[in-house]
Image: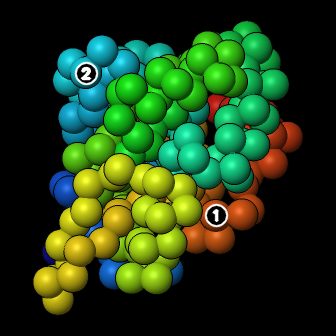
Amino acid sequence: MPFIARLSLLLIFFALPSAAKPIAEDDLSVAPLMNGQTVPSAQVSTLDGSQTDIAKLIDGKPSVIFFYRGGWCPFCNAQMGQLKAIEQDLLKMGFQLIGISPDSPKMLQDSLTDQKLDYTLVSDSELHVMRAFGLAYYTSEKTTERYRKKMQLGNKLWTTPAGDERLVLPVPAIYIVDEDGLVHFQYVNPNFRVRADPKLIITAASLIAD
């Protein structure tokens, strides 16, 4: 096959939306959606419990999409506050903010009220979007028990290939996409204590806006 033809096939492959990926065995084994790929079609729940498609939420609008573990996570709450602080800058550049977590719609509403957030939060309690983005992973037995007991999480338990019941969480991530859902920037870090600096997000967004 000529080189140009092979290159064209590769470009088409990487531009196609990713199908749902298996839940990773741990946070270091995820295979996240990469720059140059497009946001896949996947269902999420809105605050009122109705279903919509993540691709439809973007629908012609540049977006900053962030995945977080839940409103119970102090590191996630700190990040949400940081994003709130730069929201007006992002809005001026034409971006919208969309937060995705395994939290139920009721828990999302509590987060919006407690933190006085204006941006969009959606529930991915069935893991459709987290799996499509390649961010979902099984927590360890120890972590599952500790989070359920200490944080009093009521999240659904998922069965591992070995038959064990575990919590599934997303590796925290930031995606910046254009109006067509093409990923221009992504920050994915298995260390949930470390999040993308707001200045980095603003810089990346400004480059895309230009």
Quarter of the image containing the C terminus? top right
- Which of the labelled discs sits on residue 192, or is there none? 1
Residue 38 lies, in percent from the top left, at 36, 43
Look at the image and tell me whether residue 19 can be seen: yes
Front position in the image: 93 or 194: 194
For this orientation, the residue located farthest to the bottom is 162
Nearer the camera: disc 1 or disc 2: 2
Q: Identify the image quadrant of residue 198.
A: top right
Q: Is residue 106 left or right of residue 191?
A: left
Q: Identify the image quadrant of residue 156.
A: bottom left
Residue 191 lies, in percent from the top left, at 65, 70
For the point 22% across and 34% down, the residue is: 43
Front position in the image: 197 or 209: 197
- Kind of element beneath mark 2: loop
For the point 46% across and 29% down, the residue is: 108
Q: Is residue 32 left or right of residue 197?
A: left
Look at the image and tell me whether residue 30 can be seen: no
- Kind of element beneath mark 1: loop
Label 1: few (<14), some or many (≥20) within 10 Å?
Answer: some
Q: What's the residue type where badge 2 is placed? A: Gly
Residue 164 lies, in percent from the top left, at 21, 82
**With respect to residue 37, does 157 lie above or below?**
below
Q: What's the residue type where badge 1 is placed? A: Phe
Label 2: few (<14), some or many (≥20) within 10 Å?
Answer: few
Residue 96 lies, in percent from the top left, at 56, 19
Residue topped by disc 2: 49
Tell whether label 2 touches label 1 (CB within 8 Å): no
Q: Is residue 137 left or right of residue 110?
A: left
